[in-house]
Each structure stands twice: as structure tokens, then as C-alpha cells.
């Protein structure tokens, strides 16, 4: 039996705003309504609005200009819809999207150790965030950092970062993120993952393991994005040559 799964709220909101750009309600060069105005107009939470705007910026429909606001760009010549959860995880503002539930030095998971290039059981810094939409958990994001890279930063602080981990590391440590590799797999969740995501027993999860590297290929950060598998759909659009 086939099941129809509704798109997440932030995707539906992005589609609505995109439609208004296409029909001229939001003409090129105009300011889009503020986050507060969109929250009031659509009855959605601020994190949902923020994610919708980030999606539209990523796809070229909107552009942020410091000191001015978010403006409408002209319709992109080709809009390639890519579900780049890795980039989203690296650039997410922790203070805007959910709850920071754990910050600790932990033994590195085996699959993470090989990417970070550290021996098994080495302790690394983990920041674990529950991403919420309208108060409901939709993703569990666990970010792992080599201990040496985290020194001299605020990554070990127990408060949410203001801004993204990528921006924080590039500013504090003078490193430069160059590329990301994503590995997607389905599995049964650990007990703690089920509890934090509010999953019933036996519900599988989709895991997107994100390895973020500098230009030399050295991993700077590994992120495990875990979400309920029954509400996910991976889609990509690309040209044929």
C-alpha cells in the first residue's frame, strides 16, 4: 500500500513564498516580510519560518543584504532542488531551531573515528541538538569535533551557539571548510535516539552522516543527522548531458 506523506511545514511555506515571487506578489528587488510578519501571517513558529527562508536563499530565490534585509531575486534560470542536509547542519544557527541537549567529551563512535582520523575510544567533543518544528522533534543532530580543534572556541559551552558551527570555527580557528561528503543509511535507532525523537518502538530512522573537510581532505567536523525514516523523501533534480 502506498502512503502519501505531507512535506514538512517549512517546505510548504517555502513553496508558498516561491509562488508569490512567481506571480509577482513579491517582485524582484522588493523586501520579503520580516520573520515576525511571516510568523503572524502563516501561524507558524519562528524556526519553521527561518528554515523556509534559508531554503529559498539556498535555491536562489532570496538574498540577504546586511543592514537592508532579505530581498527577492529574479527567478533562477535553473532551480535544482537538492536536499543538502549536510550543508544545512553545518550552517544552522543553534539558537533558532531547537534544544541543545548535550555537550560533552565522549568516546568517538567507530564510524566517526575513521573520518576524523583518530584512534578508536579517543575522546572528542560532541554537541547534540534536537531540531524542532512547532514544538515537535524532527531531527537529532550530533556534531563531533576533534578535541584540539575545539580548544579556544565556544564549542564546549553548554549554551547554544549564536550562529553556525562552521562560521564559529572559521572565525576562531582560521580554518576553511571546502567540501562535504554525505552518507545516507537506514537503521533502527538507539534507545536514547528514540526517546529524544519521541519514536514508537520499531520505527526506523534515516541517518545522514556528514563529513566536512578542508581543501586538503582533512575532516574538520562530522555530523550525524538522524530523523524518522517514515516521513522522509530524498529528491534531486539535475541536467542530463
Image (tube, rainbow, N blue to C red):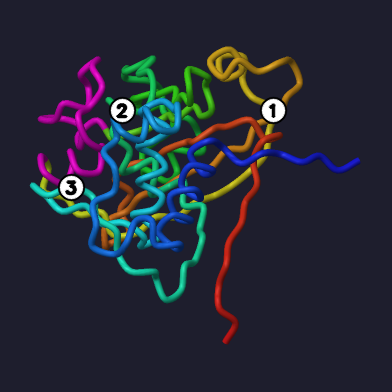
Q: Foreground: 19 or 138?
A: 19
Q: Residues within 10 Å of mark 2 (few under 14, many from 20)?
A: some
Q: In front of the other: label 2 or label 3?
A: 3
- Give SS at disc 1: loop
Q: Is residue 31 magenta?
A: no
Q: Earlier in the sequence, mark 2 or mark 1?
A: 2
Query: Image quarter for residue 57?
Result: bottom left
Q: Earlier in the sequence, mark 2 or mark 3?
A: 3
Q: Earlier in the sequence, mark 1 or mark 3?
A: 3
Above or below — where is 203 with respect to 92?
Answer: above
Q: Residue at x 30, y 26 (%)?
A: 125
The answer to the question of whether label 1 and label 3 lie on touching residues, with beta carbons closer than 8 A, is no
Number of numbered discs visible in the structure rendering:
3
The answer to the question of whether label 2 and label 1 lie on touching residues, with beta carbons closer than 8 A, is no
Above or below — where is 27 with respect to 138?
Answer: below
Q: Which residues are magenta?
A: 147-172
Q: Is residue 160 magenta?
A: yes
Which mark is drawn over residue 96? 2
Residue 228 % position (x, y):
63, 30
Q: In front of the other: label 1 or label 3?
A: 3
Q: Foreground: 121 or 232?
A: 232
Q: Residue at x 36, y 60 (%)?
A: 61
Marks 1/3: CA–CA distance: 43 Å
The answer to the question of whether label 2 and label 3 lie on touching residues, with beta carbons closer than 8 A, is no
Which mark is drawn over residue 188? 1
Question: In the figure, is residue 227 to the left or right of 116?
Answer: right
Residue 223 % position (x, y):
42, 38
Residue 78 % position (x, y):
46, 74
Question: Residue under circle 3?
Answer: 69
Amino acid at each position: 500500500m502506498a502512503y502519501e506523506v505531507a512535506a514538512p511545514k517549512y517546505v510548504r511555506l517555502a513553496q508558498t513564498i516561491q509562488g508569490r515571487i512567481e506571480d509577482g506578489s513579491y517582485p524582484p528587488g522588493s523586501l520579503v516580510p520580516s520573520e515576525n510578519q511571516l510568523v503572524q501571517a502563516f501561524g507558524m513558529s519562528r524556526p519553521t519560518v527561518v528554515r523556509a527562508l534559508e531554503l529559498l536563499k539556498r535555491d536562489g530565490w532570496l538574498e540577504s543584504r546586511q543592514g537592508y534585509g532579505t530581498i527577492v531575486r529574479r527567478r533562477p534560470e535553473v532551480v535544482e532542488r537538492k536536499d543538502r542536509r549536510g550543508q544545512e547542519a553545518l550552517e544552522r544557527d543553534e539558537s533558532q531551531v531547537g534544544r541543545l541537549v548535550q555537550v560533552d567529551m565522549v568516546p568517538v563512535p567507530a564510524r566517526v573515528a575513521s573520518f576524523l582520523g583518530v584512534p578508536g575510544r579517543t575522546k572528542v567533543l560532541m554537541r547534540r541538538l534536537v531540531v524542532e518544528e512547532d514544538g515537535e522533534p524532527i531531527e537529532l543532530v550530533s556534531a563531533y569535533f576533534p578535541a584540539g580543534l575545539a580548544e579556544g572556541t565556544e564549542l564546549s559551552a553548554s549554551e547554544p551557539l549564536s550562529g553556525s558551527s562552521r562560521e564559529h570555527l572559521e572565525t576562531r580557528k582560521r580554518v576553511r571548510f571546502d567540501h562535504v561528503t554525505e552518507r545516507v543509511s537506514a537503521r533502527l535507532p538507539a534507545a536514547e535516539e528514540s526517546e529524544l525523537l519521541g519514536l514508537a518502538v520499531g520505527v526506523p530512522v534515516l541517518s545522514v552522516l556528514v563529513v566536512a573537510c578542508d581543501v586538503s581532505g582533512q575532516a574538520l567536523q562530522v555530523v550525524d543527522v538522524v530523523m524518522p525514516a517514515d516521513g522522509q523523501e530524498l529528491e534531486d533534480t539535475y541536467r542530463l548531458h
